[in-house]
Every structure is written in structure tokens, then in C-alpha cells.
Amino acid sequence: MRNITMVLAGRARSVVTPPDRRLFTGLDAAGFEQIRHAGFAVACGRVISVPMTSGNRIAIVGAGIAGLAYAKVLSREGFPIEVFDKAPDVGGVWSATRRYPGLRAQNTKRTYRYSDFPMPEDYPDVPDGAQMQAYLEGYVHHFGLGDSLRLGTEVVAADPVDSGWLLEIRDHTGIHRASCDHLVVANGVFSEPSIPDFRGDDLYQVGGGQLLHTSQFHDLESVRGKTVLVVGYGKSACDVAEAVSHVAASTRVVARRLMWKMPRKPGLGLDYERLSLTRLGEAHFRYHRLNRFERFLHGKGRSFRDSNFDVMRELATKKMLLRELDLVPSGRFEEIAQSTVGLTTEGFYEQVRDGRIIVHRDTTVTEMLSTKAGPAVDLSDGQRVQADVVLCATGFQQRVPFLTPYVQRRLTDEDGNFRLHRHILPVEVPNLSFAGYNSSVLSQLNAEVAAHWTAALLQGRLTLPTHEDMIAEVDERLRWMDAGTGGHHAHGTAITPFALHDIDELLRDLKYRLPLRTRLAQWVRPVKPASYRGLGAKSHAAPSGPATVEPQREPQRSRADLS
């Protein structure tokens, strides 16, 4: 090995370069010295040119659902790829290092999957966190992605040059240099925990209290017999509270604002997927560009739409005993799908009914304390409650910390919203794509179709709008998202409930279409990911009109196939 001094954005570092780093050793000593002497002042807005020794090399940062979809699609399209993830295993939010007790998939195994890799038949209807991670491991094995993975390896800096990117990576042996022609950011919109700054949190922890984000909480036994307070009322808050309530001395949930939630089976023969994963279900929510039926539904047919929401609100209220528990949200029921879909955690309301979970509605934490009786928390409703452990289900920050400030400023607007064409392509930064920044209830499928879109872009098979038109489209979409969600859309990265709209737009760009019978079925039946299985087979066609993605028969699989 040899030591090289590396100057990145004005920061001098000692870099150990191992003799063999597979794909990403594209800079020879002369090229690297060129960078060092130039000073590489990207942070000040100056980008220099660096020659690459080979083309089309792609680095993917993140080995979660989206990163793996991109790895499979791009490698099958012939691109040399390498996938970096600081975790020791694949999975992203499903990694053993991040998943919390009680974590389960939101959808069933029939819809929360890749198009060409069904979940095992012997999986339960709704897989848990460990099963999801095993499924993703099986995906890696089935498609031979293992040799492209660099797990336990963090990308700590990525600096743009005219011909691609320079990467600074860190693993157990030290810091190394790497380069690529195109960078795919798949670090996830749920990767950096957001914990509020509570007054007195330092004294609370000095006094023995534990303050954790739900993604940092992995062991139920650690809270056995303790008093636990969960901050939040979203899916992770209710998942964790329900799991904890079976072992903790007491479990409380502090909800600043109650949100509507949907039972998996609300009644009248309906189920969650039939309501939320169909074209008819999506049409009930106003997209920024309406088709003919949607114009009717939000115009002359609005009474039909509103009556459907009224029925669903009443079914949900009765199913979850919300009136009896004084947990009826004050907002409109259609707010159930604003960048996320509120799905009921099985057993949560039963635990509230039985007194094992206490919900403090319309309440916030005002101060954390260390008292003679032990760690405690003051609430805005005037109560002081003992809390040995506070678990924050308070969301995530959408940031890309390894990109330079100069690049980050060009990626986002003044509110931190990502300015991405089709949620993929930055309008101001070249040689860069984003994967998974179209988070939805069909995350695998949205990521997979986006990967095909990116492959077509890199191969020159995609016709983009003008730069001005892309900027106008991004501005229009962000204004619509702000208006429809009150600004709560994960900085432009969450597209629920419009997963199918997103897929349709990408397919139109690719000039592909599903068979008419499939599109018609999707109006009233939950989408089948396998319907999109043939997309890759059409990737190099150049038809005069739209190509049809024909469904293909898929094999039955069992849990043993994942090993």
C-alpha cells in the first residue's frame, strides 16, 4: 500500500490506497497529482476536469430497496457498478442495525416486492423486519450482486469533476480514494434520524434516562419493566408502542396531532390494498395533472368522491373504537394520504382500550427532567410523567452529507426541497442520479422502474425536456406538494399516494405501456408488481410507437430459496 495526500474541497487528508479496489481505481498517480496541485476547490464553485481511464462506471451509495434495484437493473444493462453501504448488511431501513421491534411491511407480500422476485410462499401475509431483510439478501444472491457490494464501507465525501466524481470512502482498513463516471445517491430518505432538541435532555440523560430514535432501538428486553414514552403518532410510533407495551411497566404515546389511520380490513368486504393500491383509489386524491376521469371525480363527480371518504371515515372510526377512546382526529379523512399512508398497527388500539398504552393527544414534550423519583418528562397538558426511556418516532432528515455544500446548494431550494426531474435527475448537477427519492407504498416497484429510466438516460435512449421545461415542471410539482400536504412531503421525496402516477410518467418517457387489460384491472384490483416484469426485456427496443410490457409467468418460491 501507499500513502497519498488527498486535497478535497480544501481539506488535506492522508489516504491509504490498497493495491486492489476492483472497479474504482480509475485514477493513476499522474491524474491524482493533477487534482492535488489544482487544489480541487469545488466548495468555492470551481469544478476541474479529471481524465477517466474507463467509461460508464457507476457508484451507488446505499444498499437498501432502491440501491439494490438500481444495482440489478444497471448491471444487467452492462454497466460496471459498485454499491457502497456503511451498514454490515443490506436492507436500508430493514437492516438489523436499524430496524425496531415491531417493524413490519406496510403492504402484503403480494405487492411489497420487486417485479421479478416474488416473496416466498411460506412468508406470512405481512412480513416482519427480519423477513424483509432476508428477502433482500435473497434478491442479492439470486441476481448475483454480491461481488458488487462494499458493505461496511461509508462514502464520506463525493466531489464532482467534469468527467464524473471523486469519492472518499472509509472502511475498517482506513480511508481510500475512488472514482466513477456517474454517481447514484440511494442513501434513503429515512436514513438520518431526526431527534427534537428537548429542553433539559442533557440533565435527563445524566440522571439515567435514555433518549433514542426508534431506528436506534433494537432490543425489547432493554425496556422490560421500565416506563417508556413514545413521541409521535405515525406508523413507527404505533408499531414501537404496541411492541413495547407487552414488556414495559407503562407505555405512553405523546401525539402532537392525531392522524387518520386505515385498518387493513375496515369492513364491507374492503381491504387496505384494494383502496390504496389501485388506480381508482389514487384517483380520489388530487394529482397535479388530472386525467379525464380524475377531472370528473374532482369536479362534477366530487359528491361521489366525498361520500366514499365519509364511508371510509365511519368504518375506520368504528373499527378502531376511536370515539370510545377519544382518539378521533380533527382533520379531514382525505389527509390519511399526504406523502405517507396512515395504516393501523395491529393490536395498537386494543392495547389502548385495555389500558396498556396511554395516548396523550394534542400534546407535546415541554421539558425533560431528572427527579428524585427518576427520569421524568413534563407535557404541555400539564402532566409530569415518569419515563425511563423516551423513544422518538419523529421522522428523518433528508440530507446527503457526503456531497459538498456547493453541490447541495444546487440540489435543493431555499426550503431544502430536492429539485429533481421525475424524482431522479437533478436539474442543476450533471452525472448524478437519485434512487428512492420517490418513496411510496410501492417502493420496490417505483425504484425498479426509475432504474430502467436511469439506464435509458445513461445509454442516450431518453429524450429529456429542455432545461427550462424541467425547472418549470419541478417548480409546479413542489408548489402542488406544498399545497396538498401543508409542506409535509419529506422535502419533495415522498410521493404517496401517487405511486402509480409516478410509474406511468416514467413509462411514458420510456415509450412503454402495459397491456390494456392490465391497465383496466389496476383500476379496481391492487397492482401486481409482476405486471412490470418484462420491462427490462424491452429496454433496447426502438419501436415507432409505445412498446408493450407483456406479463410473464413467474415461478413459485419458498423461504428455502432465500438461502
Image (cartoon, rainbow, N blue to C red):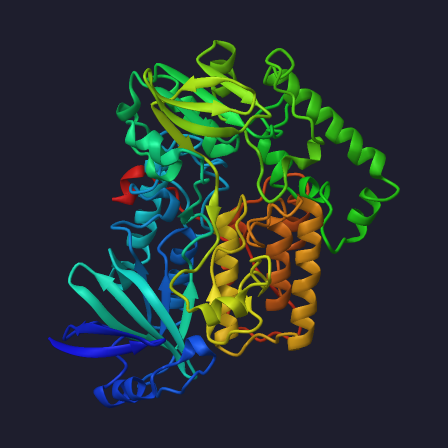
Q: Position of residue 314 (x, y in %)?
A: 70, 21
User: Of 550 and 194, which appears nearest the observer?
Assistant: 194
Residue 538 seen in render:
no
x and y percent of residue 121 in the render?
39, 36
Q: How many numbered discs, if any?
A: 0
Q: Is residue 198 left or right of residue 492?
A: left
Q: Check the image and report above or below for 253 versus 14.
A: above
Q: Is residue 296 left or right of residue 456?
A: right
Instruction: Tell me residue 520's x, y (percent).
Output: 69, 47
Tell me which residue sits at (44%, 32%) in the image.
Answer: 126
Is residue 222 visible in the rendered structure shown here?
A: yes
Q: Residue at x 84, y 34 (%)?
A: 303
Q: Nearer the viewer, residue 13 or 54?
A: 13
- Where is residue 327, by image quadrant? top right
x then y, percent, for residue 502? 61, 55
The quadrant of the image that shows the N terminus is bottom left
Q: Is residue 537 above or below residue 213?
A: below
